[in-house]
Structure formats: structure tokens, C-alpha cells
Image: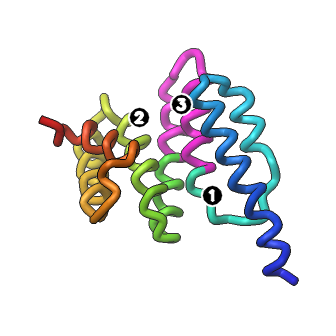
């Protein structure tokens, strides 16, 4: 019975994350935030949910205060931790890129860059995907 319930919730989890990501691309962050509020029973997308929460938090914040940046950074760190525990490399890459962007002008920039490079180097294929192309650009590997 539990497997059936999880199978039924999986499309809802995916669709909520997909909708939130689409809303971020169109800069409709409030709808993206609402999509993330849909209750989930499946935890496979928890890392991506946290990353998107951080992204939306930064986008909706008008002042970009240190407090907001720290909250977003913590969401990105939690997303990275969960994605590594679940061994979801794509979500780890996205979380590491988000963490790097929020730390780009801080002392932790080099740490974030090193972490991003480590995750990037784990990929043996798929280097033509948008995420890996973006990571490559962030790492300065594009000549």
C-alpha cells in the first residue's frame, strides 16, 4: 500500500517542482513560491525544493540584506547536503551553483568554487546539458 501511495504522489512532486522552476524562468516568483507550498509525500525532490526556495527568497527580497542572503545560503547548503545523501548528482550540481552565486562576493567564494568543481568533475557524460554548460562557464573552463 505504501508503494502505491508513493507512486501516486511522485507526479505531483515532480509537477510542483517543475512548475516552480518554470515560474522562476518567467520571473513569476510568487507563483513559484505557491507551487513549492503544495504538500509532498515523496522526498526525492527535497533538495531541488530547498534550492528553489532559496532562489525565490533572494528574488522576492527587495533589500537583499545579509539576513536574507544567509537564509538563502542555508537553504542551498541543506539542498546540497540532501542531494549528496540521495546521490542525485544533477541536484547537487544545481545546489552547488546556487551556493556559489550567493557566495560570489564573500570570503567563502573559493570554498564554493572548489565544491562546484568537485561536483562538476563527477560527471562523465552529459556535458552538453544546460546545467553542466552553466557550471563550466562559472568555473571559467570555457576558453
Magenta residues (range): 49-75
Please give the residue where the numbered disc 3 appears in the rendered image: 67
- Asked if the stretch drawn in magenta spans residue 70, the answer is yes
Q: Residue furthest right?
A: 1
> Do residues under tags 1 and 2 come within 8 Å of each other at their CB atoms?
no
- Element at badge 2? helix
Please give the residue where the numbered disc 1 appears in the rendered image: 46
Structural crowding at the residue carrying mark 3, measured as other residues with C-alpha within 10 Å and reported as few (<14), some (14–19) or many (≥20): few
| 4, 105: nearer the viewer | 4
> Do residues under tags 3 and 2 come within 8 Å of each other at their CB atoms?
no
Residue at the location (60% across, 24% down)?
Answer: 26
Q: How many numbered marks, from 0 up?
A: 3
- Element at badge 3? helix
Q: Distance between the residues labelled 3 and 1?
A: 23 Å
| 33, 18: nearer the viewer | 18
For residue 102, the mark is 2
Structural crowding at the residue carrying mark 1, measured as other residues with C-alpha within 10 Å and reported as few (<14), some (14–19) or many (≥20): some
Q: Distance between the residues labelled 1 and 2?
A: 20 Å
Residue at the location (44% across, 48% down)?
Answer: 94
Quadrant where the image shows the N terminus? bottom right
> Do residues under tags 3 and 1 come within 8 Å of each other at their CB atoms?
no
Amino acid at each position: 500500500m505504501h508503494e502505491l501511495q508513493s507512486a501516486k504522489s511522485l507526479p505531483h512532486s515532480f509537477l510542483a517542482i517543475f512548475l516552480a522552476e518554470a515560474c522562476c524562468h518567467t520571473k513569476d516568483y510568487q507563483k513559484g513560491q505557491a507551487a513549492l507550498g503544495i504538500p509532498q509525500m515523496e522526498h526525492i525532490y527535497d533538495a531541488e525544493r530547498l534550492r528553489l526556495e532559496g532562489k525565490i527568497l533572494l528574488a522576492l527580497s527587495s533589500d537583499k540584506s545579509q539576513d536574507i542572503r544567509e537564509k538563502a545560503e542555508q537553504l542551498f547548503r541543506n539542498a546540497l547536503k540532501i542531494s549528496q545523501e540521495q546521490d542525485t548528482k544533477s541536484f547537487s550540481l544545481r545546489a552547488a551553483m546556487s551556493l556559489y552565486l550567493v557566495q560570489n562576493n564573500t570570503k567563502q567564494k573559493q570554498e564554493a568554487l572548489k565544491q562546484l568543481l568537485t561536483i562538476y568533475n563527477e560527471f562523465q557524460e552529459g556535458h552538453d546539458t544546460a546545467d553542466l554548460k552553466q557550471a563550466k562557464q562559472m568555473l571559467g573552463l570555457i576558453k
